[in-house]
Image (tube, rainbow, N blue to C red):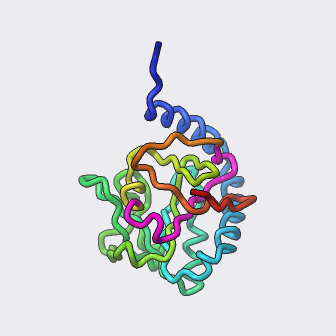
Amino acid sequence: MQVTTLDDEKRRLRREVLDRRNRLTTAQRVIRSADILQKLFELEAARSATWIHFYVSFGSEVETTGMIAHALSRGKRVSVPKMEPATKQLVLSELKDPVRELLPGPKGIPEPKPDAFRPVEIDTMNLFVVPGVAFDGRGNRLGQGAGYYDRMLAGVAGRIPIVGLAFELQLVKEIPVGDHDVKVDWVVMEKRIIKCGT
């Protein structure tokens, strides 16, 4: 009899949800991401934040380009992640001009160019906006599997609000979790916002 491990369960769920998400057309992603932008800024935590950390969208993720522009246009300061593959850490860098300051990084994900890298301390943030492959109603998040975001958020969970962005099709009944998985406080989707319980 084959024993299913936590990692096996996560891999299966990751494949399943990514397959659904990747079937969205570009037009569907753009329209739904615009709806998610509106919902995100309905949150008092987003409206009142002076510093917001955004992921830079890649592939079929909820698009953050418009959200970053929206935040900057309202005088908010924005940080985005830069990968440090040697240590498997994310470092934060202030982003002032998304059009001119980003280039594909180690995994093809846009990140700050070397001459536009402006390090920011993690505790400067008032809000973290993070990606995920899947979420459940309790705030459990399934990422890509490398643990970059869990390592970054471990020190801020419970102190600085964390928002996960997702399309409705990424919400699942239950995500298998391990000791190092960090929960989000809200999941913002195109039709609703879920405030996650403990």
Q: Give the quadrant of residue 35.
A: bottom right
Q: Position of residue 22 (x, y in %)?
A: 61, 43
Residue farthest along the bottom direction in this orientation: 75
Vertical comparison of 180 with 161: above or below: above
Q: Is residue 161 magenta?
A: yes
Residue drawn at (62%, 80%), measured in percent from left and top? 47
Residue drawn at (39%, 75%), measured in percent from left and top? 123
* Magenta stretch: helix, strand or loop mostly: loop
Q: Position of residue 189 (x, y in %)?
A: 68, 58
Q: Is residue 90 magenta?
A: no
Residue drawn at (59%, 75%), measured in percent from left and top? 45
Q: Position of residue 16 (x, y in %)?
A: 59, 35
Q: How many marks?
A: 0
Q: Is residue 165 left or right of residue 191?
A: left
Depth check, front residue: 9 or 165: 9
Q: Give the quadrant of residue 156.
A: bottom left
Vertical comparison of 37 with 1: above or below: below
Residue farthest along the front direction in this orientation: 198
Q: Is residue 25 left or right of residue 121?
A: right
Q: Which quadrant: the C terminus?
A: bottom right
Vertical comparison of 131 with 78: above or below: above
Magenta residues, as a range?
A: 154-172
Residue drawn at (42%, 56%), measured in percent from left and top? 149
Residue farthest along the left direction in this orientation: 86
Q: Position of residue 170 (x, y in %)?
A: 63, 47
Depth check, front residue: 97 or 121: 121
Residue farthest along the top direction in this orientation: 1
